[in-house]
Amino acid sequence: MGSTDFLIFAAAVTDRAPQAQSETGRYEFRVWPRETPQAAAILQKSWPLTGAERRSDIYLLTEHSPENLVKLRAGNRLEAKRRGPDLGLLQYWTHQPYPLFPLSRQDLRRLAEDLGLPPLTAEAGLSPGHLVARLGALAPFVLPVTVRKSRLVFRKAGSRVEICHVATADWSRLTLAIEDADPDSALDTLDALGMGHLANRSYGDVLRRPRLAAGTATRTP
């Protein structure tokens, strides 16, 4: 696959919007086009650029990832997303962050539920390294996969839209996503960007299937 790098023409800009720390829901529409769509040009031409970042997350993939998606944000902070009922073309997700490590027994029980696993030992909650080592031993039921991201973030009205190059050890893809707390606003943005004909697939949908099917990361989803 090609390089995951792309020009960030406002690298000094940071995403000014505060990150949610509660179980707040939002509607999402994420696409993974084979070629750069016209929507990317529209965003870069007429939408305010509010953020640019490079980050690596560790996704903890299971058969439940399309509904319960768990990751270590930047490799050190646990986050879970739960998918609710879809609304037409839109997926509805709630964001449920975990406290910092070390994790309490209650947090470990919640994590085991999110991953669909039996109870985890107290050692797994000591640090991100302890957790990844423990979950790595449970493969193929849980597969930790490092995902490198290079993204631009645009905002207009209530919609947040990102252009992101995503790479794992063996493949790279472009993804564009709309996130909005208001479904009508999200649909207006979807119409304006002309992406409604593309399939709405989450990170859980795209990352999980080839890895859990084969037990290794060998194919491009």
Image (cartoon, rainbow, N blue to C red):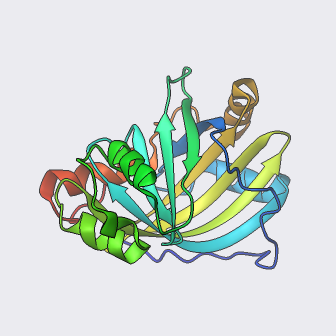
Residue found at x 69% / y 26%? 183
Residue found at x 84% / y 52%? 46
Q: Nearer the viewer, residue 156 or 103?
A: 103
Residue found at x 66% / y 44%? 22
Whether residue 117 is visible? yes
Q: Is residue 196 above or below residue 87?
A: below
Q: Is residue 67 above or below residue 140?
A: above
Decide if residue 180 is on the left or right side of residue 131. Answer: right
Image quarter of residue 146? bottom left
Q: Nearer the viewer, residue 91 or 192?
A: 91
Decide if residue 81 is on the left or right side of residue 19. Answer: left
Give the quadrant of the N terminus. Answer: bottom left
The spot of residue 44 in percent (x, y) is 76, 59
Decide if residue 178 is on the left or right side of residue 155. Answer: left
Q: Nearer the viewer, residue 134 or 66?
A: 134
Image quarter of residue 14? bottom right
The spot of residue 119 in percent (x, y) is 27, 50
Q: Is residue 152 above or below residue 62?
A: below
How many marks on residues? 0
Whether residue 171 is visible? no
Decide if residue 70 is on the left or right side of residue 51. Answer: left
